[in-house]
Image: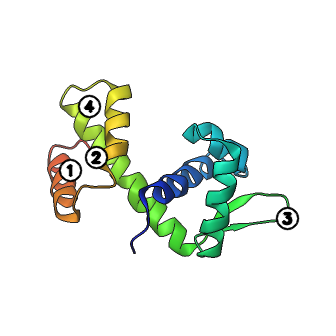
Amino acid sequence: MQIRESAEDYLEAILVLSRKGSGVRSVDIATMLGVSKPSVSHAMKLLREDGYIAMDRYGTVTLMEKGAEIANRIYERHTVLTKMLEGLGVCNEVARADACKMEHDVSDESFEKIKEHLKAKGEI
């Protein structure tokens, strides 16, 4: 399942916001990602058309199954890579920013080895 990096970021943001307990709205996504509301509106239209999300009549965004799969994969990569960088002594803010860049490009093989290494050390 190959989608653009920006779409992965939107799906991850929806996942993170949905875990906070309240409904996810476009304005929340715009605030979290630091993008304009029209950009979010356009992205939501494309994600909805491709079956990654659903929106109800009130504008509440929900991940569909295939959107949730991608969001969970990207979020796992983000958290594991952040932990790895912090374990190397990188401050949290920089580790999170760098993990956000790396999560899209690291190979599945490398990511699995990083996870195994952190698990062996008891860090995840």
Q: What element carries label 1?
A: helix
Q: Quadrant of the N terminus?
A: bottom left
Q: Is mark 3 on a helix, strand or loop?
A: loop
Instruction: Indicate left or right for 5 with 56 as reference.
Output: left
The residue at 39%/61% (across/down) is: 73
Residue count near mark 1 (Cα–Cα under 10 Å), binned few <14, some 14–19, many ≥20? few
Residue 109 image point, x, y percent:
17, 64
**Residue that carries the numbered disc 1 in the rendered image:** 119
Distance in Å between CA atoms under marks 2 and 1: 5 Å
Residue count near mark 2 (Cα–Cα under 10 Å), binned few <14, some 14–19, many ≥20? few
Amino acid at dot 2: Ile
**Residue that carries the numbered disc 3 in the rendered image:** 57
Amino acid at dot 4: Glu
Question: Are the residues at dot 2 and dot 1 in contact (C-beta closer than 8 Å)?
Answer: yes
Q: Which of marks 2 and 4 is nearer the N terminus?
A: 4
Instruction: Indicate left or right for 41 with 63 as reference.
Output: right
**Residue that carries the numbered disc 2 in the rendered image:** 124
The residue at 28%/44% (across/down) is: 81
